[in-house]
Amino acid sequence: MTDTMLVLTVEGADTIIAQGGSQHWRVTVSRARQQKYLVCAQNERKALAERDNWPAATGTEPHGSGFLVGVISDIVPSGEPGRSRICISKVARIAKPNLWPRVFGPVLYRNIADLGIDLATLKWQHVRSPTPIPATDAPVQMSDAALKAAFAANHGVPLESVTVTIRL
């Protein structure tokens, strides 16, 4: 069993701290909620490429380096369909060169000890509650296939286990 989500992010430490977590992740919510820690590694290449178009692309650490550890407090919808915000209650800055293992996909599940992070040596600071994501009044329109896929992903069940029934 793992205890840590390791993410490759374009967000910088100050952005993550200011918004109370890291946003817009496509995760299996039930699995994400089983994790205690969020460890952030920098996606510097994408941050530099997206900086003009994406306000959250504020990261400046060397590519693949670990720069932040957070204590996960909740996993909530991010305001972007099918994506989640990883909320944190405490955070500590780290400097771990080449932490990202250069695998495909920006979210990995690991054990914090296996990442070489000693929690007892970290200097923790509390993080304010996350900024609420504004609700939209517009209904979300999804195809049956997209609805089934989102439901399966959010509940950690196989797609073939999901059926949609509408009774009129």
Image: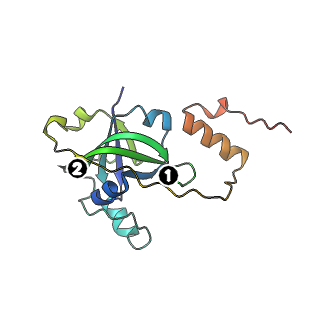
Q: Which element carries disc 2, helix, strand or loop?
A: loop
Label 1: which residue? Answer: 78
Which mark sits nearer the N-terminus, 2 or 1?
1
**Could you tell me how far apart the alpha carbons at marks 2 and 1 are, in whole angstroms?**
28 Å
Foreground: 130 or 26? Answer: 130
Q: Position of residue 23 (x, y in %)?
A: 43, 53
* Mark 2 burial class by Cα count in 10 Å: few <14, some 14-19, many 20+: some
Residue 146 as seen in the image, left or right of residue 13 = right
Q: Position of residue 128 (x, y in %)?
A: 33, 51
Q: Residue at x 37, y 64 (%)?
A: 57
Q: Position of residue 69 (x, y in %)?
A: 26, 45
Question: Can you say which quadrant of the picture contains the C terminus?
Answer: top right
Q: Residue furthest top?
A: 1
Give the amino acid at mark 1: Ser
Residue 142 as seen in the image, left or right of residue 32 = right
Q: Residue furthest left?
A: 121
Q: Are marks 2 and 1 in contact (CB under 8 Å)?
A: no
Q: Position of residue 60 (x, y in %)?
A: 26, 63
Give the amino acid at mark 2: Asn
**Residue 10 higher or lower than 148, as above or below:** below
Q: Residue at x 57, y 52 (%)?
A: 81
Residue 96 as seen in the image, left or right of residue 8 = left
> Which mark identifies residue 151?
none
Label 2: which residue? Answer: 98
Q: Which element carries disc 1, helix, strand or loop?
A: loop
Choose top left, top right, bottom left or bottom right for residue 34.
top left
**Residue 52 higher or lower than 21, as above or below:** below
**Residue 106 higher or lower than 1, as above or below:** below
Q: Residue at x 67, y 54 (%)?
A: 140
The way the protein has been coloured in the rendering is rainbow
